[in-house]
């Protein structure tokens, strides 16, 4: 363990030196290749039960809240602001006005429409109903006014929207959630990958196979035979960077599912992958020792990284040095909208 910690510290210093002494140009082809172990059979948020599912779900969907990794607190994602009343048992969320669902045949003219507050109410109610009828427990629903009664009334035959009084539509861009009692952790709970917002049209057309969202990426292809999932950039994503440039930067993300650690490590060593997620320390240590020159170069080809906020974890990532701005929260959410692929060549 001491060797791993020492390498992490050393690589951090190398990264700082690299940033101050080297300028790197953006690659024209902004594609990221990610390796994980288990191919996700289901991508329906309410049925979430593995990390690989969450990593895809949070690329194609957004929730009301996200996690600010640097400051370790929840921040608005689909909302530009939220207000709590004096008793801290009622929260009013104000949505951004420029959010649109992905273009899809479930919509009129196959064009994604604007996300509005009724979508938030529908989606959260459907998620809670799905969890109830599939024995997932009451969970977050217990905190919402009328939630216990709603949970007990759910049956596995029909979903009836609009039956949860604690979630109220105020206007097209404002939704209010009333709690049974003050709960400072409720906002944080909305960051979870199963609390994302889905369109009613998508649920009606595809049921639990719905992958229509409003996130930074769109599913282009799911190939179970070759164990890959390809995502492409959502051209209508609502976020921009501080310079006004459209996010995400990446044009494509390819998830490759390979369960054999030795093969996974060879792929990134040979530059056939850019990022390995969730590798156990037992596999990391011998790989780093055998390929130490790739980690200790002035401008390292490979970088060892822990999940942000998970100081005690035995799970590590390996990424290529050209992968910039990667963030992974302690809530197991992978943020790719700001990731850039940079050229490995220095500029004079």
Image: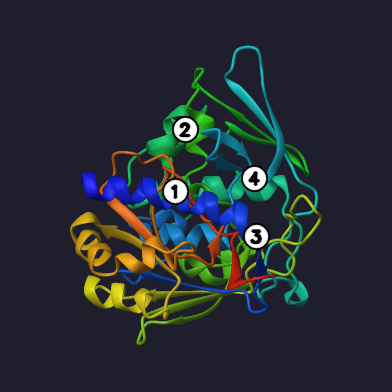
Residue behind mark 3: 214
Q: Which mark is residue 147?
A: 2
Q: Nearer the viewer, residue 45 or 80?
A: 80
- Density class for disc 4 (Cα within 10 Å; few <14, some 14-19, many ≥20) is some
Position of 317 with respect to 341 (left or right) is: left
Please give the name of the residue rendered at 25% of the width and 73% of the height, measured from the top-left corner. 259
Please give the name of the residue rendered at 32% of the width and 54% of the height, measured from the top-left corner. 316
Please give the name of the residue rendered at 37% of the width and 63% of the height, measured from the top-left corner. 295
Q: Which mark is residue 12?
A: 1
Distance in Å between CA atoms under marks 4 and 1: 29 Å
Closer mark to the observer between disc 3 and disc 2: 3
Q: Earlier in the sequence, mark 4 or mark 1?
A: 1
Residue 342 position, x and y percent, is 60, 69
Tell whether label 4 touches label 3 (CB within 8 Å). Answer: no
Q: Earlier in the sequence, mark 3 or mark 1?
A: 1
Distance in Å between CA atoms under marks 1 and 2: 47 Å
- Density class for disc 3 (Cα within 10 Å; few <14, some 14-19, many ≥20) is many
Distance in Å between CA atoms under marks 3 and 4: 11 Å
């Amino acid at each position: 363990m001491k060797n791993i910690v020492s390498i992490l510290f050393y690589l951090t210093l190398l990264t700082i030196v690299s940033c101050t002494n080297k300028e790197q140009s953006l690659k024209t082809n902004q594609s990221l290749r990610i390796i994980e172990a288990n191919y996700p059979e289901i991508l329906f948020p309410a049925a979430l039960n593995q990390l690989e599912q969450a990593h895809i779900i949070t690329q194609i969907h957004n929730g009301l809240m996200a996690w600010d990794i640097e400051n370790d607190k929840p921040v608005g994602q689909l909302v530009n602001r939220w207000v709590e009343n004096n008793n801290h048992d009622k929260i009013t969320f104000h949505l951004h006005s420029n959010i649109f669902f992905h273009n899809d045949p479930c919509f009129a003219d196959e064009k994604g429409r604007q996300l509005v507050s009724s979508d938030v109410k529908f989606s959260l109610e459907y998620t809670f109903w799905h969890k109830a009828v599939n024995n997932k427990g009451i969970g977050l629903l217990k905190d919402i006014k009328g939630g216990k009664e709603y949970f007990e009334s759910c049956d596995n035959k029909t979903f009836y929207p609009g039956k949860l009084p604690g979630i109220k539509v105020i206007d097209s861009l404002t939704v209010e959630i009333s709690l049974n009692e003050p709960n400072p952790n409720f906002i944080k709970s909305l960051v979870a990958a199963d609390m994302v917002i889905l369109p009613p049209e998508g649920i009606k057309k595809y049921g639990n196979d719905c992958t229509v969202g409003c996130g930074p990426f769109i599913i282009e292809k799911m190939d179970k035979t070759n164990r890959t999932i390809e995502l492409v950039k959502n051209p209508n994503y609502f976020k921009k960077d501080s310079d006004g440039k459209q996010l995400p930067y990446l044009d494509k993300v390819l998830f490759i599912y390979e369960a054999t650690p030795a093969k996974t490590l060879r792929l990134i060593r040979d530059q056939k992958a850019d990022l390995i997620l969730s590798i156990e320390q037992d596999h990391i240590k011998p790989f780093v020792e055998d390929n130490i020159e790739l980690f200790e170069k002035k401008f390292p080809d490979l970088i060892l990284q822990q999940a942000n906020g998970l100081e005690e974890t035995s799970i590590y990532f390996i990424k290529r040095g050209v992968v910039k701005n990667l963030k992974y929260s302690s809530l197991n959410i992978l943020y790719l909208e700001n990731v850039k692929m940079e050229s490995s060549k220095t500029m004079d």
